[in-house]
Every structure is written in structure tokens, then in C-alpha cells.
Image: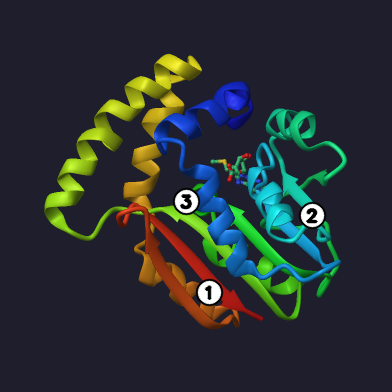
């Protein structure tokens, strides 16, 4: 699905977030605290924007981006060639030995994986002791009135706009469905703790439509 929409993916992110998606990734990247000359991992990197945000926060940091959608990474390579190392892989079974990375980030992927706990277990495994994991994911607003108003856009208007701009209406119908089917933020935080993360925190941002999860190994 992501390979099919790869060439319109960035445009759709800009439209859907009213141009805010890179600011959001930058703020989340700061929470990952990439160290000088450190090594960072962007899981499910797609077109590489979260990895690039890490480099904006700490330009001396080396970033590896992993995804299994080759077309998505192809778009990323054109944008960020030389500054991010792209590698094919499944984030549920990373082809990486343990305790290698100073920090790891992932954006808009948790609701797409078949096993969220395993995703966190892999992040924990490849992090060095003291390293931070930061995840960014869409969530439903808590306030009922705002949830209904946001739903008019997210559940109804956005799939139409997405279908029109990307040529893949199904992909943008799947997006709100996957958000509604996903775990509540507190349940996600619980899974992080269950695999060993400490100091787990959840922040709701963008008027409660996004959640940022942070944990330390
Ligand atoms: C919504 S895109 C997010 C891309 C990017 N992280 C961003 O911030 O824009 C979801 C990405 O997750 C990738 N993905 C989903 N499951 C994956 C897995 N098990 N291993 C690696 N990548 C995965 C998809 O191929 C897709 O590129």
C-alpha cells in the first residue's frame, strides 16, 4: 500500500497536517536527544522525514532509516541521499545486532504493525543502555465534542482528498480505520513498560490528535 502511494505520500502529509508534519517530527526528534556524533535509527522511515528531523536536531548524528517499502525509501533517497543511510528490513525482526543505537524514532507506524509489543521489544533490543525510543502516532482526541468535529474532517473529508490526490482512495480510507482500531495511548505506554522501558511518558499534541511516546532503556 505504501509503495503504491509513495510519490504522493509527502504531499498528502502536508495537506493532512496543514503543513505541520515536519514541525511535529522535529519536536519529537528533540525528545530522542540524539547525542553529538551518535548513531540514530528511524524505524519505518518511509520517505525519511523523521530521520532528517533527527539530523536537523543534531547534524553530527548518523541516521539509519529502515523500512520494507522500497518505493517509499526510493523517494527518501532522492531527498536525503548522503545524509541518511536507508536499509531494507522488518522492524519486527531487525537485521541489526543488539545495543547499537543511541536513540530510535518511528512515526505513524505503530498502528500498522501486526505486533506492537514486538515492535517495542526490537527497539529496546537495539538501543544502548540509556538510549531513548520516541514514537509518534495519530490518536483520537479525548474530548467528545472535539472528537466529533475532528472526525468530520479525518473520517470523511480527508479520505476523499487523499483518494483524489494520491489516486488510492482505499489507502486513505484505511488511515482513519486504523486509528480507530488502534490501542489507547495508555495501553501503548503499558506495552513499552512491559518490554523494559523506564520513564515512559505520553504527550498529546496537535490539539490531542497526535501522541508522542518516550521511553528510556
Ligand atoms: C505512514 S508511513 C510513515 C513513514 C515515516 N515514518 C513518516 O514519518 O512519514 C508507514 C511506514 O511504515 C512502514 N512499515 C510498516 N510496517 C513495517 C514493518 N514491519 N517494518 C518496516 N517498515 C514498516 C511502511 O512501509 C511505511 O513506509
**Which of marks 3 and 2 precedes in the sequence?**
2
Quadrant containing ligand 1 reads: top right
| The N terminus: image quadrant | top right
Residue name at image x 81 percent, y 69 percent:
36
Badge 3: how crowded within 10 Å, few (<14), some, or many (20+)?
some
Q: Which residue is mark 1?
A: 192
| Residue 39, horizontal then vertical, whole percent | 82, 64
Residue at image mark 3: 111
Residue 131 pos. (x, y %): 71, 76
Bin the neighbour count of mark 1 within 10 Å (Cα to Cα): few under 14, some 14-19, many 20 and up: many
Report the label total. Answer: 3
Q: CA distance from mark 2 to mark 3?
A: 23 Å
Q: Residue at left 38%, top 66%?
A: 185
User: Of helix, strand and loop, which one carries label 2?
Assistant: strand
User: Which residue is denoted by mark 2 in the rendering?
Assistant: 63
Q: Which sits earlier in the primary sequence, circle 1 or circle 2?
A: 2
Q: CA distance from mark 1 to mark 3?
A: 14 Å
What whole-number distance in Å separates the C-alpha atoms at marks 1 and 2?
Answer: 23 Å
The kind of secondary structure element at disc 1 is helix
Q: Nearer the viewer, mark 2 or mark 3?
A: 2
Amino acid at each position: 500500500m505504501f509503495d503504491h502511494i509513495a510519490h504522493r505520500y509527502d504531499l498528502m502529509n502536508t495537506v493532512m497536517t496543514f503543513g505541520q508534519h515536519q514541525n511535529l517530527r522535529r519536536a519529537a526528534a528533540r525528545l530522542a536527544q540524539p547525542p553529538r556524533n551518535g548513531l540514530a535509527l528511524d524505524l519505518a522511515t518511509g520517505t525519511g522525514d523523521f530521520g532528517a528531523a533527527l539530523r536537523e536536531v543534531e547534524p553530527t548524528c548518523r541516521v539509519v532509516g529502515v523500512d520494507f517499502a522500497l518505493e517509499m525509501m526510493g523517494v527518501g533517497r532522492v531527498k536525503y541521499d548522503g545524509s541518511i543511510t536507508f536499509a531494507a528490513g522488518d522492524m519486527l525482526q531487525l537485521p541489526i545486532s543488539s545495543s547499537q543505537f543511541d536513540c530510535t524514532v518511528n512515526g505513524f507506524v505503530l498502528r500498522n504493525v501486526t505486533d506492537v509489543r514486538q515492535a517495542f521489544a526490537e527497539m529496546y533490543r537495539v538501543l544502548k543502555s540509556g538510549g531513548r525510543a520516541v514514537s509518534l502516532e495519530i490518536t483520537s482526541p479525548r474530548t467528545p465534542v472535539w472528537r466529533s468535529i475532528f472526525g468530520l474532517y479525518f473520517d470523511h473529508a480527508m479520505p476523499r482528498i487523499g483518494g483524489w490526490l494520491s489516486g488510492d482512495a482505499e489507502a486513505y480510507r484505511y488511515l482513519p480505520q486504523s486509528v480507530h482500531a488502534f490501542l489507547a495511548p495508555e495501553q501503548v505506554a503499558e506495552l513499552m513498560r512491559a518490554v523494559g522501558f523506564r520513564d515512559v511518558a505520553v504527550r498529546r499534541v496537535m490539539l490531542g490528535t497526535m501522541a508522542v511516546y518516550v521511553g528510556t532503556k
